[in-house]
Image (tube, coloured by chain):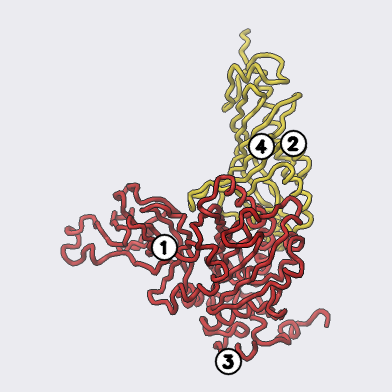
Chain colours: A red, B yellow
Amino acid sequence: MAAKNHRQWTAEPNLQMNEWVDSRIYSDPQIFEEELQKIFKKTWIPVCHESELPKPYDFRTTSIAREPIVVCRGPDNEVRAFLNVCPHRGMIIERRPSGSFLEGQPSGNPKRMTCMFHAWQYDMKGNCVYISREKEGFQDRLCKEDVGLRRLRCEVKFGGFVWVNLDDNPKVSLEDWAAPAFQCLRKSLDAEPLEVFHYHKAVVNANYKLWHDTNCEFYHDFMHYHNRVTGFNDAYFARKNEAFDHGHVVVGTFQVNYEKYEGFESRAALSFPHLPPNQWYMIDLFPGMNFNLRGSALRCDIVTPLGPDKVMIEYRGLGLKRDTPEERMTRINHHNSIWGPFGRNLHEDLIGVQGQGTTMLPGSEPRRILHGRHENQTIHDENGMRHYYEEWGRWMNRRPSKPDQPFSEAIAVAAE
Amino acid sequence: MEVRPVQPPAGFIVNETNARQCPGVLETSWGNAVDAANLVRDAIYRSTIALDQQDWNGWLEQCDDEFQYAIKSWSPEINKDMTYLALDRKGLENMIKLLPKHNTDHSPLTRHTSVYTVEMNGDAIAHAVSSVIIYQTLLDGINSHIDAGESRLFLVGKYIDKLKIKDNKAKFISREVRLENRRLDKGSHWPI
């Protein structure tokens, strides 16, 4: 059939119910607000890497689902996370992206988190240790012990990433939630300390799931000249797309021929520990995190949804902490050649997802977005997205293809 | 009538060495050193024009065979000095040659460059620091119906250049684009 009229265009595709979604899940403001409450405030999010706060009293600020967070390393070397909110008048306590609490601040003392507004101070365990004119103002009605910071679940795991969960009682432990998906790389990531060498961010007018879709599906490699010339061969098309519990997906490895792209080089000499040369693994975690290891450099994407049609993506690049300056520079170059903000592939990915966002603005006509490719669960099979949206439906109790209806486990399973 | 010596421009550091030893500069005077500095300034502004015109090869013609190019930024997020791109001349040539193979945001970039300082040394080498503000005039990056024609601030930073002066011409030996930005949105495939 050629071009379609409106009825034909909006008709359900001749595919199973789990092989497409309604575009409103990428644009509806109410669905977006529900996602923040039901998913992002309930799940584990890697907010930074331990190498970003290497010394006691170092800190890093971040946010999840609009809640500001401060992560700090205590004098006992423990990394802890708190809401970055003063319990007094709701002021954000630490305004810088990173730094050290060893330095005194205009309103407070060294070794303290100080709210600049009224000089209330907290230690690295979140205890309130100073209230200015405490007795004079509160007499015995309220004291320091009553007003500690809001502590958050926080663990350092899977290659030294700092994971935070806003839910005090998560449904599943971090280990159980992500360990099976990390299994393929865990030995490599945990062999020795890693270190972040790259950070930048992109704010894109598109739903966060569209970015995660792009990381989950490799069919879009047709967009990347680099990937076509360095990858399209039998081994590439045999790469497995493996689904794991909790909505995660892992794309199996193969050997990339970097030399086939003019000006690029093999990454064999700097492979991560325990890996054969020039391997390429991809781990996609629900609801929007990506760990991508191309031989010598690890990339991590973390999404922060800002609206139904707006997302911030933070990009990190990591190498081994023990790198010599020369090794580090080589890793950086490898990372940047494809993934840097001036590299060959990331720019193309972001144009792609921005283009999707342009057609799926809030209020735009609902459409069917397909992910119905079946290729024996290999790299261009879209089973990764089908698996993701089944998990999404479960958390949201909405059917991805008919988001006005409740999710039915039976329908999803039967369709698969 | 009193004859006053030529004064170097603001920010130009002239000393005995750079005033006397610049090849192509005929006499030892403030004015001759200024001549050399003007060659440097001229090269920086001409390179800006070539880059704005996407005349990549024309830009590279202004660069020495040993040219080194880097885009860098300090990150207060991770407390690291970062390199976002580093290429030698050959690497740049490869990158430019393969541009048509890639899908790209074609929104033109317009650089406003102001040369702040030019410092010469006796080896006919000039060090220059310029402020650069880069605007992006949207074309096909988002939704052309709505956005095409709109100019946005894209990048803020400095050009830290090293040039050599020979035969009355200034050629780039190195350029470091030192960005303030860490939010780079879609980024770019093009030399900045």
Q: Residue at x 83, y 83 (%)?
A: A1
Q: Secondary structure at mark 2?
A: strand
Q: Nearer the viewer, mark 3 or mark 1?
A: 3
Q: Are marks 3 and 1 in contact (CB under 8 Å)?
A: no
Q: Which residue is mark 1?
A: A69
The disc labelled 3 sits on which kind of residue?
A: Ala
Q: Nearer the viewer, mark 1 or mark 4?
A: 4
Q: Which residue is mark 4?
A: B174
B46, above or below A90, in the image? above
Mark sitting earlier along the chain (4/2): 2
Residue B65 badge: 2
| Residue B41 image position (x, y, % from top left) | 67, 31
- The numbered mark 1 sits on a residue in which chain? A
Task: Tell me the distance, in whole angstroms, between the alpha carbons under discs 1 and 4.
Answer: 41 Å
Instruction: Kindly indicate whether the residues beneath marks 4 and 3 are on one polypeptide chain.
Output: no
The disc labelled 4 sits on which kind of residue?
A: Ser
Instruction: Kindly indicate whether the residues beneath marks 2 and 3 are on one polypeptide chain.
Output: no
Task: Tell me the distance, in whole angstroms, between the alpha carbons under discs 2 and 3.
Answer: 66 Å
Q: Which residue is mark 3?
A: A410
Q: Are marks 2 and 3 in contact (CB under 8 Å)?
A: no
